[in-house]
């Protein structure tokens, strides 16, 4: 959960599972673990180390890919110079939003998205409608996704759904062979397209409706439950 200490005992268990699966199509009964996160590269790269991940991982909702085995970072082909120029323009607009709302900040770590972050006190919700209207009127080829602490303005074609397709192609598998855990509106399309999908108890209604299994458990406990359920099918 954001702004909360990591539950290292649960992360260690997840890492132990990951170590038992050396390849995407391993025969150990433990599925390969990856990440498809809206967070920026540094966070996702660090988490891939912590979880002993050996498969490529996705950051910025799938616009970027990092391979822990080769240490190579690549950007999705749809992240073109023209798209980057639009992202920069939206980020410039968000700087004006931040100037009027000092409890909100720009996430400058992200390159392919224009993003705002804030505390869980609801201030993000105060500006969400304004941001959505601006994007709809000025940048109609962008999505606006939000959580209780963030707003992400994401180009069409660079969402988690496209990222999962890119990851599947990179790993030489089909999307139907993949499982996905998601908890927000930005996860809905990916939840709907994979072979098995899961939402934790803290997920939005939209994410729970799109998932094949809505857990009674929260955050990492729900992730572990999902991993164990998929392992049991292997």
Image (spheres, rainbow, N blue to C red):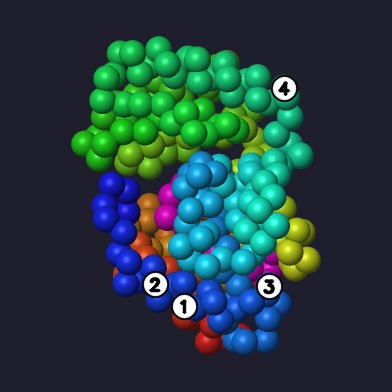
Q: Which residue is mark 1?
A: 16
Q: Are marks 1 and 2 in contact (CB under 8 Å)?
A: yes
Q: Which residue is mark 4?
A: 82
Relative horizontal placement of residue 117, taking residue 18 as reference (left or right): left
Residue where numbered disc 3 is placed: 24
Question: Which of the two discs, 3 and 2, labels the residue nearer the N terminus?
Answer: 2
Query: Are dots 4 and 3 in contact, CB under 8 Å?
Result: no
Q: CA distance from mark 4 to mark 1?
A: 42 Å
Of badges 2 and 4, nearer the viewer stands: 2
Asked if residue 81 lies in the magenta stretch, the reply is no
Number of marks drawn: 4
Tell me what residue is drawn at x 42 percent, y 38 percent. 146
Mark 1 in CB contact with mark 3 (< 8 angstroms): no
Who is closer to the viewer here, 126 or 66?
66
Q: Residues within 10 Å of mark 3 (few under 14, many from 20)?
A: some
- Image quarter (top left, top right, bottom left or bottom right) of the N terminus: bottom left
Helix, strand or loop under label 2: helix
Secondary structure at badge 1 equals: helix
Q: Which mark is residue 152?
A: none
Magenta residues, start to end: 175-187
C-alpha gap between disc 1 and disc 2: 6 Å
Q: Which mark is residue 12?
A: 2
The quadrant where residue 125 appears: top left
Question: Percent x, y for residue 158?
Answer: 64, 40
- How far from the left and from the top, in percent, is residue 170? 75, 58
């Amino acid at each position: 959960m954001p702004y909360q200490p990591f539950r290292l005992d649960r992360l260690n268990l997840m890492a132990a599972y990951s170590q038992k699966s050396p390849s995407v199509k391993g025969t150990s009964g433990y599925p390969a673990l990856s990440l498809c996160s809206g967070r920026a590269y540094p966070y996702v790269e660090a988490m891939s180390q912590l979880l002993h991940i050996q498969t490529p991982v996705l950051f910025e909702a799938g616009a970027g890919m990092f391979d822990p085995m080769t240490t190579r970072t690549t950007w999705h082909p749809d992240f073109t110079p023209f798209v980057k120029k639009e992202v920069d323009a939206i980020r410039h607009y968000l700087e004006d939003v931040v100037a009027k709302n000092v409890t909100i900040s720009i996430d400058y770590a992200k390159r392919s998205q224009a993003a705002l972050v804030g505390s869980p006190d609801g201030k993000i919700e105060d500006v969400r409608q304004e941001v959505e209207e601006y994007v709809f009127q000025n940048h109609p080829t962008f999505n606006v996704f939000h959580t209780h602490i963030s707003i992400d303005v994401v180009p069409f074609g660079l969402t988690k759904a496209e990222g999962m397709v890119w990851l599947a192609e990179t790993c030489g598998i089909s999307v139907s062979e993949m499982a996905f855990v998601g908890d927000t509106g930005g996860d809905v399309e990916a939840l709907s397209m994979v072979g098995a999908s899961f939402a934790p108890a803290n997920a939005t209604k939209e994410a729970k409706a799109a998932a094949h299994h809505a857990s009674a458990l929260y955050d990492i406990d729900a992730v572990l439950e999902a991993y164990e359920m998929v392992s049991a099918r292997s």
